[in-house]
Amino acid sequence: MMEISWIHLVILILAAFRFTRLIMYDEITSFIRAPFLTITTDYDDNMEITHNIEIKGSGLRYWIGTLLTCHWCVGIWSSIIIVALYYYLPSSFPLLLIFAIAGAAALIASYLDK
């Protein structure tokens, strides 16, 4: 197995974090979730937004929908994709770096929004 530097490990961690969020939550990837999930938005008693998720279908469709609602599940698959890109397609490193920077920016924004 290849040795990995600590900075590359941090980049991979942040890239996997951002890629997971991209698949699960971002509007730009809603077409991936649409065949498997129906997501409606409501407001609770405190006028805070709540998202209601309904998994569509049965069998394989339902199973994929279940996976898409599990942050840990999507995180594992996202990590596999990120690591595979890193090891088997070294030219993808700039893309991984972009995901890592976006992931770090998201973490900083979340921290500052508290």
Image (cartoon, rainbow, N blue to C red):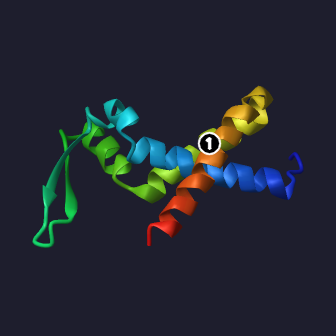
The image position of residue 96, as x and y in percent, is: 68, 39
The C terminus - image quarter: bottom left
Which residue sits at x=77%, y=27%?
91
Q: Is residue 94 above or below residue 3?
A: above
Camera-side residue: 28 or 61? 28
Q: Does 97 appear above or below 41? A: above
Quadrant of the rendered structure where residue 37 is?
A: top left
Q: Compared to 96, does 10 lie above or below?
A: below
Q: Mark 1 — residue?
A: 99
* Image-based side of 81 in relation to 6, left or right: left
Which percent across, then down, holds residue 55? Answer: 21, 47
Query: Label 1 is placed on what type of residue?
Result: Phe
Q: SS for tag 1?
A: helix
Q: How many numbered marks, from 0 up?
A: 1
| Left or right, 54 with reference to 7 | left
Residue at the spot x=51%, y=67% of the render? 112
Image position, residue 60 (x, y; %): 30, 38
Q: What residue is drawn where x is 88% and y is 46%? A: 2
Q: Residue at x 31, y 50 (%)?
A: 66
Q: x and y percent of residue 68 in the render?
A: 36, 47
Within 10 Å of the Cα at label 1, are there few (<14), some (14-19), or many (20+) other Cα atoms?
A: many
Q: Residue furthest front?
A: 112
* Viewer-nearest residue: 97 or 105: 105
Position of residue 103 in the picture relative to residue 37 (left or right): right
